Image (cartoon, helix red, strand yellow):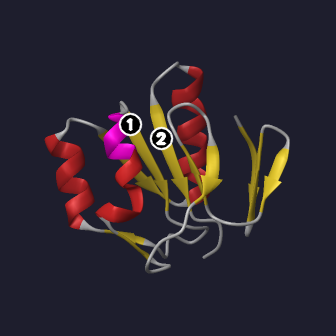
Amino acid sequence: MIEDYSFGQIKIDGKIYKEDVEIDGKGEIRSWWRKESHFIDENDIENAFKENPQAIIIGTGAWGVAKVSPEIKNKAKEKQINLIVDKTGKAIKKYNKLQEEGKRITGFFHLTC
């Protein structure tokens, strides 16, 4: 469960991370690196599409600066995956809600702007 978020850091299961994170369908957490900091393309979340979750949640930063490519939206629709894109604070609330409901989800969270 994501316990807390503030600009530049996120607390997950008691551990604080200070860089963007990916949480896969098994709950494993890893650094999330993108070719372009504020543009998210299909390659940046390819692991999620391989897992075929019920939902992919993308947090686009505190102010929603990061943008999601149309290819991601199209692929999610094609694979019938619920794609949720929102500012990171709101995306985290949605992630926690779906996790509590027992959904298979993958989350990507940009922690700064």
Q: What amino acid is labelled 1 in the image?
A: Ala
* Residue 101 sits inside the magenta stretch: no
Q: Which mark is residue 106?
A: 2
Percent of width and height locating residue 81: 28, 37
Residue positioned 69% across, 66% down in the render:
19
Percent of width and height locating residue 90: 56, 51
Element class at badge 2: strand
Q: Quadrant of residue 97?
A: top right
Q: What amino acid is labelled 2 in the image?
A: Thr
Q: What stretch is highlighted in magenta?
A: 48-52
- Would you say the residues marked 2 and 1 are in contact, meaning their CB atoms lie under 8 Å apart? yes
Q: Is residue 19 above or below residue 30?
A: below
Prevalent SS, magenta region: helix
What residue would you read off at disc 1?
55
Classify 10 Å Cα crowding around label 2: few (below 14), some (14-19), many (20 and above).
many
Percent of width and height locating residue 30: 63, 52
Give how far apart the Cα atoms at labels 2 and 1 are.
Answer: 7 Å
Q: Is residue 63 above or below residue 94?
A: below
N-term-proximal mark, 2 vs 1: 1
Q: Is residue 104 left or right of residue 28?
A: left
Q: In this view, does 33 lie above or below 12?
A: below
Residue positioned 73% across, 68% down in the render:
7
Q: Is residue 87 above or below residue 47?
A: below
Residue positioned 44% across, 80% down in the render:
36
Q: Which residue lies furthest to the left in this view?
A: 78
